Image (tube, helix red, strand yellow):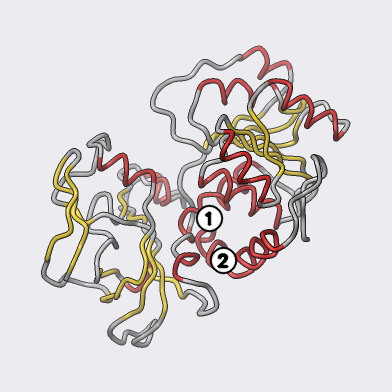
């Protein structure tokens, strides 16, 4: 079979490999996403990934053999986390943040191949109604579902997302679908901002006046929830500055090092700063269930004319 193999820093090639053996169900892969983590691995900057390694942890395919859970030909995706089940964290009911957490495509062979073998317990059925490209987005969408839960998001909340990359944009679409009062995306990339506006999102630059204008238009002193998805010190500062008293800040990005935090601001305004990492099985299952309705929502957004000058943002609830 053909597979995309990481051999070392800046060394990735398509190779012929034998079919994977061992326990689990053999899945014929139809599509596999390329994550920012895959790019980190390619650069040789991931602390755990070692070559030779078949990349890919965002994939969809079909089972090629019968098993008790899935008949042959079932359309499936993979819950890619591998927990030890023995550490204190796992035993406390939080295996998604296992002390020795591993993932398919990072610590062991992943789905960027014609075939992958996965335990049936790690597979989830995927609706036939969604395309392969959409189905491969279950994993990043699960990151967003988990971030929303961790932040205490509730319908009607006014939200800011700093960093409008794949995760930030997916999070905006998810929160809008879940009934957010408003969702404003902030980014430094003007071309990206223009694209998002064309798609019906309220997208703005990260200049101070952009935050202030968004809040002034709503008659608010701060956002209820701010999701930091940029991985930059300035984004953390802005998240704290523009969250309302008693609101919450969710750090969704993975920072490369320590960042300064204004603890006086944190204390005086009683802000909650929440860390997030990957997702639970329940989050992943919800993400799979949301694929079809969110795809329909976004298709509808593209079919409509762009939003009028902000605000309000486009919404179909």
**x%, y% of residue 179?**
76, 54
Check the image and name the residue furthest to the top: 264
Residue 133 lies, with reference to residue 86, above or below; the image says below
**x%, y% of residue 266?**
66, 19
**x%, y% of residue 98?**
37, 46
Taking 292 as reference, is 140 left or right?
left
Residue at label 2? 291
* Mark 2 residue crowding within 10 angstroms, few (<14) / some (14–19) / many (20+): many
- Identify the image quadrant of the C terminus: bottom right
Residue located at (41% from left, 74% from top)? 76
Q: Work out whether residue 199 or residue 233 is closer to the camera in this orientation and state it.
A: 199
* Mark 1 residue crowding within 10 angstroms, few (<14) / some (14–19) / many (20+): many
Instruction: Give the mark nearer the N terminus: 1 vs 2.
Output: 1
Taking 48 as reference, is 16 left or right?
left
**Cβ–Cβ under 8 Å for marks 1 and 2:** yes
Secondary structure type for disc 1: helix
Q: Work out whether residue 265 or residue 11 is closer to the camera in this orientation and state it.
A: 11
Q: Quadrant of residue 97?
A: top left
**x%, y% of residue 213?**
79, 27
- Identify the image quadrant of the N terminus: bottom left
Residue located at (66% from left, 59% from top)? 302
Residue at label 1? 141
Residue 217 lies, with reference to residue 93, above or below; the image says above
Residue 127 lies, with reference to residue 145, above or below; the image says below
Q: CA distance from mark 1 to mark 2?
A: 8 Å
Residue located at (29% from left, 75% from top)? 28
Q: Which mark is residue 185?
A: none
């Amino acid at each position: 079979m053909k597979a995309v193999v990481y051999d070392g820093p800046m060394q990735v090639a398509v190779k012929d490999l034998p079919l994977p053996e061992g326990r689990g169900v053999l899945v014929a892969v139809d599509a596999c996403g390329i994550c920012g983590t895959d790019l980190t691995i390619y650069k040789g900057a991931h602390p755990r990934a070692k070559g030779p390694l078949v990349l890919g942890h965002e994939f969809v395919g079909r089972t090629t053999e019968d098993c008790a859970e899935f008949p042959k030909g079932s359309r499936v995706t993979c819950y890619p986390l591998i927990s030890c089940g023995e550490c204190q964290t796992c035993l406390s009911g939080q295996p998604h943040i296992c002390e020795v957490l591993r993932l398919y495509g990072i610590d062991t062979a992943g789905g960027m191949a014609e075939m992958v073998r996965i335990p049936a317990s790690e597979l989830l059925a995927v609706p036939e109604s969604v395309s392969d490209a959409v189905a491969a987005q279950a994993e990043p969408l699960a990151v967003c579902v988990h971030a929303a839960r961790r932040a205490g998001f509730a319908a009607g909340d006014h939200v800011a997302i700093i960093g409008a990359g794949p995760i930030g944009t997916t999070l905006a679409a998810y929160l809008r679908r879940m009934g957010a009062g408003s969702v404003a995306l902030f980014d430094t990339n003007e071309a990206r901002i223009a694209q998002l506006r064309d798609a019906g999102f309220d997208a703005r630059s990260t200049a101070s006046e952009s935050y202030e204008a968004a809040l002034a238009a709503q008659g608010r002193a701060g956002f209820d929830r701010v999701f930091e998805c940029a991985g930059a010190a300035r984004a953390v500062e802005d998240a704290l500055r523009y969250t309302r008293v008693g609101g919450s800040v969710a750090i969704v990005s993975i920072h490369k090092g320590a960042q300064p935090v204004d603890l006086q601001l944190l204390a005086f305004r009683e802000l909650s700063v929440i860390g997030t990492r990957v997702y639970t099985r329940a989050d992943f299952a919800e993400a799979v269930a949301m694929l079809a309705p969110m795809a329909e929502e976004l298709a509808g957004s593209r079919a409509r004319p762009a939003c009028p000058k902000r605000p309000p943002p486009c919404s179909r609830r």
